[in-house]
Image: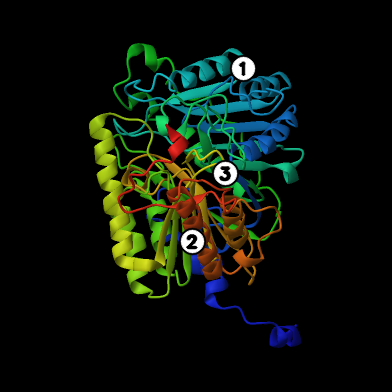
């Protein structure tokens, strides 16, 4: 053993999960039981295998067989911002509602949490939650419509856990930015989902293309995701939260007891996974977060302090100057650090005041980043092969090919302070980059329109960022020249100008 130690390559501190992940004290929420169950006093689980699921089709193609495999005694825990019972998940048209009702008929238990706002403003989406919860209850499931947030906040956590007491090695958790609802079932070709979310801006066309990201997690971290569900479910103050009408209180009734906890699933891989969350400070207080929790913001802040080479971020709402300052500080501190940001071409439809406010905040955030990093900052949006913009809904960050975060939390003030959110930070336990690098290369390969395996020039993050920039500039020049010839590149990225006012010619 001594001889092995003498000859083994030494690991730098930057290779260790502890360099990147929060301690329990740094999480800033001593009331939660999330970190108490991890051995050795760490605030994350080890021995996990994590698989990125890029775009909704890939996620649903993994979710459907996992739910079809559920049998008697198995358990499903589901949390959604919006859950549409009849949403088709695959080419055969199977829906999440059908899969969950089939699980109930087979003797599995199903527990579900759905967001329920104070005011039902989103008539195209929000009633789906009520209908889904009602259907589950009628068939023996348990479901709550959860209003335990601030008046204009929302429960934004999106995850599903499957536990199998007789087959713990098959336990799985899915978490990230994808809900089973309209527009989500798109793939890497980005021709859109025929089931359309009507609130998307007209510039995205009649069948908006949609880019998103989720994770499939196996190993001990599955129990951590379940624990987050249990904390919300068991909150005894549910009936005292919010101005719920008498009718709605029927849907927000006290929760039935959950089944007893199972031991954590066995080791499945070599990734450390830390769950980062946002809960607002609210009265009556959450028992599991009496002063709220800001570990999403804290987790990003710690990782950005260690950034040295490249930060890649994809986000639906990189519109908050307060959040952008965390990235700008890293750029000012590290003169060689580069930032690649991918953002939507335009926000969802909104009123005149809302759209103007979003545009101003977005410009301020991007101006802040460019002032800090100059030509080390690249900001892109995406379009498909038809020249239509792709709506970017993902919430992804990769730092130095070591730390990666995928979840529900956007890079804006409300996701870092106001809504409830769940994001997974993933770090490889070994000395060599794996998950984070592979996720970055996978995303860049899609954005460049590459075929599988054509990624040699993307392996190095700095060189890869230059490839992305050159390709985006070539596509933009082709548009500027009237698109009279064949496209010079299969890439889908275009540089986002500071004015951010352009629209692809075919987008109207």
Q: Residue at x 50, y 43 (%)?
A: 383
- Give the label, 3 or 2, closer to the camera: 2
In-image side of 118 versus 212 (left or right): left
Task: Please give left or right for residue 107 compared with residue 86 in the image.
Answer: right
Could you say which is closer to the camera, residue 153 or residue 18? 153
Name the residue tied to disc 2. Answer: 469
Between circles 1 and 3, the one closer to the viewer is 3
Q: Residue 293: image x %, image y %?
A: 37, 48
**Mark 3 = which residue?**
214
Nearest to the observer: residue 468 or residue 76: 468
Label whose residue precedes the other's in the sequence (2 or 1): 1
Please report the residue visible at 71 percent of the width from the left and 35 percent of the height from the top. Answer: 66
Q: Compare residues 133 and 290 and report the one nearer the observer.
A: 133
Q: Which of disc 3 and disc 1 is earlier in sequence?
A: 1
Q: Which residue is mark 1?
A: 140
Question: Mark 1–mark 3 contact, CB under 8 Å?
Answer: no
């Amino acid at each position: 053993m001594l001889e092995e130690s003498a000859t083994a390559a030494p690991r730098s501190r930057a290779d260790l999960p502890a360099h990147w992940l929060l301690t329990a004290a740094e999480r800033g929420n001593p009331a939660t039981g999330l970190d108490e169950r991890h051995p050795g006093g760490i605030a994350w689980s080890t021995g996990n295998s994590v698989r990125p699921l890029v775009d909704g089709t890939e996620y649903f193609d993994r979710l459907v067989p996992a739910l079809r495999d559920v049998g008697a005694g198995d358990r499903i825990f589901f949390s959604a911002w919006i859950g549409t019972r009849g949403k088709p998940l695959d080419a055969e048209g199977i829906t999440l509602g059908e899969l969950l009702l089939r699980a109930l008929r087979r003797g599995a238990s199903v527990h579900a949490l759905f967001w329920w706002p104070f005011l039902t403003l989103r008539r195209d989406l929000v009633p789906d939650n009520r209908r889904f919860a009602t259907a589950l209850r009628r068939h023996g499931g348990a479901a709550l419509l959860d209003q335990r947030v601030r008046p204009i906040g929302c429960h934004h956590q999106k995850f599903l856990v499957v536990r199998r007491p007789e087959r713990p090695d098959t336990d799985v958790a899915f978490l990230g930015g994808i809900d089973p609802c309209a527009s989500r079932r798109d793939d890497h070709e980005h021709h859109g989902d025929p089931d359309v979310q009507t609130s998307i801006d007209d510039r995205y066309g009649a069948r908006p293309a949609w880019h998103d990201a989720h994770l499939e997690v196996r190993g001990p971290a599955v129990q951590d995701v379940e624990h987050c569900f249990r904390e919300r479910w068991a909150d005894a103050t549910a009936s005292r939260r919010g101005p719920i009408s008498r009718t709605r209180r029927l849907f927000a009734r006290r929760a039935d007891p959950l089944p007893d906890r199972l031991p954590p699933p066995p080791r499945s891989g070599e990734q450390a996974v830390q769950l980062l969350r946002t809960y607002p400070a609210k009265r009556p207080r959450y028992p599991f977060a009496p002063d709220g929790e800001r570990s999403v913001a804290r987790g990003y802040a710690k990782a950005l302090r260690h950034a040295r080479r490249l930060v890649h971020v994809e986000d639906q709402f990189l519109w908050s100057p307060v959040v952008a300052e965390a990235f700008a500080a890293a750029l000012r501190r590290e003169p060689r650090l580069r930032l690649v940001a991918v953002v939507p071409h335009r926000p969802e439809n909104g009123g005149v005041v809302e759209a103007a406010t979003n545009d101003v905040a977005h410009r301020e955030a991007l101006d802040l980043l460019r002032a800090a990093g100059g030509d080390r900052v690249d900001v892109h949006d995406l379009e498909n092969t038809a020249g239509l913009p792709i709506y970017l809904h993902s919430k992804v960050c990769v730092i130095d090919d070591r730390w990666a975060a995928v979840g529900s939390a956007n890079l804006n003030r409300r996701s870092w302070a106001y809504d409830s959110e769940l994001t997974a930070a993933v770090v490889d336990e070994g000395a060599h980059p794996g998950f984070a690098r592979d996720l970055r290369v996978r995303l860049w390969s899609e954005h460049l329109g590459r075929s599988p395996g054509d990624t040699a020039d993307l392996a190095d993050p700095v060189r890869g960022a230059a490839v992305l920039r050159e390709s985006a500039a070539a596509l933009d020049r082709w548009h500027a020249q009237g698109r009279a010839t064949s496209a010079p590149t299969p890439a889908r990225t275009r540089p986002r100008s500071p004015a951010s006012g352009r629209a692809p010619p075919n987008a109207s």
